[in-house]
Image (tube, helix red, strand yellow):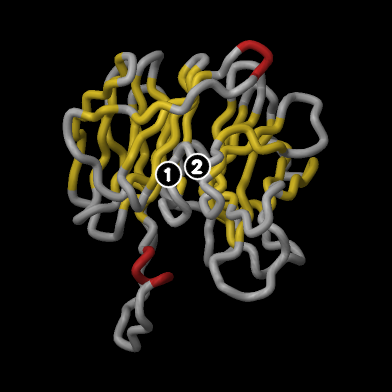
Amino acid sequence: MIIGSIGARTIFVVKPGAATAEPWIQPDDQLTLGILGVFADEKAQTLWACFSSIHDVKHPPSTLKAFDLQTGALKEKYPLPTAGAFCNDIAVGGDGTAYISDTNNMEVDRLAPGSRQLEVWAGNGGFGPQGGVLDGISVLGNRLFVNTLETNKLFMVPIEAGGKAGMITDIKLDRAIHNPDGMRSLGKDSVLMVEGGGKGRLSRIEINGDSGRVTPLKAGYPDGAVSATVVGTTAYVLEGQLDALFGEPDPHRVSKPFHATAVEVGNP
């Protein structure tokens, strides 16, 4: 399991059989940039990672970086194309195209195989107004899904011939979602999504056309569920402790370890 840290600006790895994470890819010279989403593309042997600033200060451009999945060596870096961008999370299509959620600009960028730069792929107001916080992203076959943390929406974008983006569709869910965050594909017709509302929840959403059925799998993440990944029939949910990072300073706050917990999700 591979984990990115906003505060430590480090990518951690949990090796097979281990119970704790260890530092793997250390901070670089862009010390104002924290690490948001990470995505291991095993087919291409590439680890994708979003580097962004969480502070309203002068900082380097938000950047997508590609690392060798075995050695951790930096392969390439790709600044996001729109001014004020915030690289949040990554998904990879079957042809190797990387898709990136730009939180601030409410856009999805893409990096086609062999391309040297990112391009804006979808957005232009289709995901809602600025401030909606475009966040989790996943690909199911020829469909891309992305959610919005503030407006509690799930959108679908068809990946059409030639890789073009189709019409953005607001998925009609059978129950409300609250502060959706990290999201990963599960089988051919479902996504796993963590929600940060309340004490946090992991849910499975089965997609049927422009509708989605939400099935809660586990609730109760007091330190805020921020992302999930799937290995076989098990999901691992990461708690982010975002209140400590973004909340009001609290001199009485006690530091505590971060946890990733396992949840059985069954066969897709």
* Residue at which label 2 appears: 125
Image: 188 above or below 89: above
Query: 53 left or right of 141?
Result: right
Q: Give percent across and percent down for residue 149.
A: 37, 49
- Neighbour class for label 1 at 10 Å: few (<14), some, many (≥20)? some
Image: 178 above or below 144: below
Disc sitting over residue 128 in the figure: 1
Rendered residue at 18%/45% (across/down): 219
Q: Give percent across and percent down for residue 168.
A: 46, 28
Q: Give percent across and percent down for residue 172.
A: 26, 28
Number of marks in picture: 2
Rendered residue at 20%/39% (across/down): 176
Rendered residue at 24%/50% (across/down): 200
Residue nearest the viewer, comparing 151 with 259: 151
Q: Amino acid at mark 1?
A: Gly
Task: Assign a secondary structure to mark 2.
Answer: loop
The extreme bottom residue here reads 251
Q: Is residue 231 visible?
A: no
Rendered residue at 50%/19% (across/down): 158
Query: 124 left or right of 253?
Result: right
Q: Amino acid at mark 2?
A: Gly
Per the model, the C-alpha gap separating discs 1 and 2 is 5 Å
Disc sitting over residue 75 in the figure: none
- Neighbour class for label 2 at 10 Å: few (<14), some, many (≥20)? few
State the image quarter where residue 218 is shown: top left
Image: 22 above or below 181: below
Residue nearest the viewer, comparing 81 with 234: 81
Marks 1 and 2 close (CB-CB < 8 Å): yes
